[in-house]
Image (tube, rainbow, N blue to C red):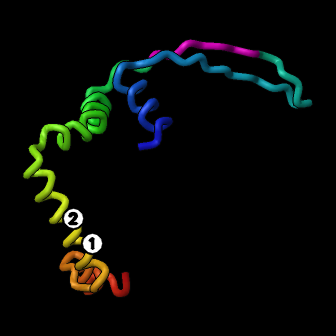
Amino acid sequence: MDEKILHSLYKKAIGYTVNEKTLEYSPEGDVVKKKVTSKHYPPDIAALKAYLELVSEGDSLEKMSDEELENEKRRLLLKLEEMKNGTDKTERESTMRYGTV
């Protein structure tokens, strides 16, 4: 996951404050008025949930036993082989629905 995206999601999850600048110009293009306001964005529960799911994503592998990891490895290798041979069911369904993948 891109660190910048993860950081932005974290900020939204905990809430943050931003200084906003508003400039007013004269017809000649000169700055007539400059206003700086502070705007607070409250914590967002949906962002917090998404952040926690992304951060804890790797934990599921850490909790797997050696046998479960081996089974997952076999499943993924089989899936790759099916995709390479063109026998992957999901790829065929996508081709049937949308044309060439």
Who's the residue at 67% across and 20% down the image? 21
Amino acid identity at mark 2: Leu
* Residue 86, horizontal then vertical, whole percent: 27, 85
Who's the residue at 19% across and 72% down the image? 78
Drawn side of residue 92 relative to residue 98, left or right:
left
SS for callout 1: helix
Locate the N terminus and report the quarter of the image it occupies: top left
Amino acid identity at mark 1: Leu
* Residue 68, horizontal then vertical, whole percent: 9, 51
- Magenta segment, which residues? 34-40
* Residue 97, horizontal then vertical, whole percent: 26, 82
Write down the residue under mark 1. Answer: 80
The reply to whether dot 1 and dot 2 touch (C-beta < 8 Å) is yes
Write down the residue under mark 2. Answer: 76
SS for callout 2: helix
- In the image, residue 46 above or below residue 93: above
- In the image, residue 27 above or below residue 76: above
* Residue 60, horizontal then vertical, whole percent: 17, 41
Drawn side of residue 71 relative to residue 94, left or right:
left
Q: Residue 70: which quarter of the image?
A: bottom left
Who's the residue at 30% across and 34% down the image? 55
What is the CA distance from the residue labelled 1 to the residue labelled 2?
6 Å
Which mark is on residue 41?
none
Locate the C terminus and report the quarter of the image it occupies: bottom left
Q: Residue 92: which quarter of the image?
A: bottom left
Q: Is residue 90 magenta?
A: no
